[in-house]
Amino acid sequence: MDATTRVIQSVYASTPDSQAGNIRLNRRGEIVTSEFVLQAALDGRLYCASAGALTTPVTFGATATIDVTKPVLWGSVPSGTTIIPVAIVLYMEAFGTNAQFECDARIGTGGSRTSGGTLVTATNMRSDAPNTSQVTWYQGDASPVFVGVTTNISRFWRDGQQFAITKATASATATVSDPNRFVWKLMDSYSAPVGIGASQIAVEQGSQAGTGFCDLYYIELPTVSAS
């Protein structure tokens, strides 16, 4: 074998679920790693589920306080599927009259949809959409009736305001704070929620008469049992 000839071998590594995968090398033969979420996006495994479209917000069902039967966005993860939430963006277009505002996100099992809500389709963040999400999503409008998660409930996000009100005019001074965009990001959090199907995930809010939009970004992978 001369110096210009190379022997290429497949190198395998076992993943935590006992599945073998190829180790990726660059042209110089170096092992290259990339950030997990970016790699999921490149692999076509990053999705977005949205409540509200363009300039049409959702009229949220829960008033005064969070009502788990009237979520902003609700997802059912089937058996054979695992999801990892990456980010949640909740934009409140209106709060209503002066009242408490609160929002959260929870993951667990035992939840279900009874009636109402509007079916939404999650989109693949890769433009050619090589994979399709198996999660069933609803936005909580149209008189929603859901059963919140009942077992192994993990609340991984909580935010809000002691008092919130729909503004009639812009704030006149820089000292006035009127937040209306609430964000959770995996990379800023000490929590890493994982939904292994069958399980459910919900974003919830409570306001006097809230309307708005919500985007939930998540990685979805097939669930593979260890051998």
Image (cartoon, helix red, strand yellow):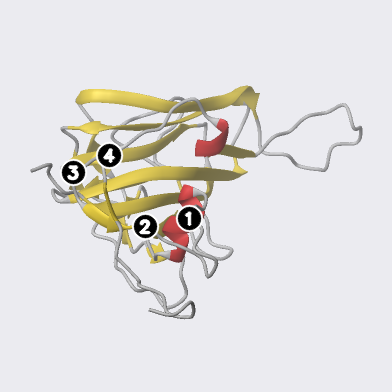
Return the disc, 2 or 1, that comes first in the chain's sequence.
2
Residue 8: where, in percent of width, then height? 35, 71
**SS under mark 1:** loop
**SS under mark 3:** loop
Number of residues whose C-alpha sits closer than 10 Å to that of mark 3, classed few (under 14), some (14–19) or many (20 or more): some
Residue at mark 2: 23
Q: CA distance from mark 4 to mark 1?
A: 30 Å
Mark 3 vs 4: CB contact within 8 A: yes
Q: CA distance from mark 2 to mark 3?
A: 28 Å
Q: Nearer the viewer, mark 2 or mark 3?
A: 2
Residue at mark 4: 195
Mark 4 vs 2: CB contact within 8 A: no
Return the disc, 2 or 3, that comes first in the chain's sequence.
2
**SS under mark 2:** loop
Q: Is residue 95 toward the left or the right of residue 23 in the image?
A: right
Residue at mark 1: 31
Number of residues whose C-alpha sits closer than 10 Å to that of mark 1, classed few (under 14), some (14–19) or many (20 or more): few
Q: Is residue 98 toward the left or the right of residue 112 in the image?
A: right
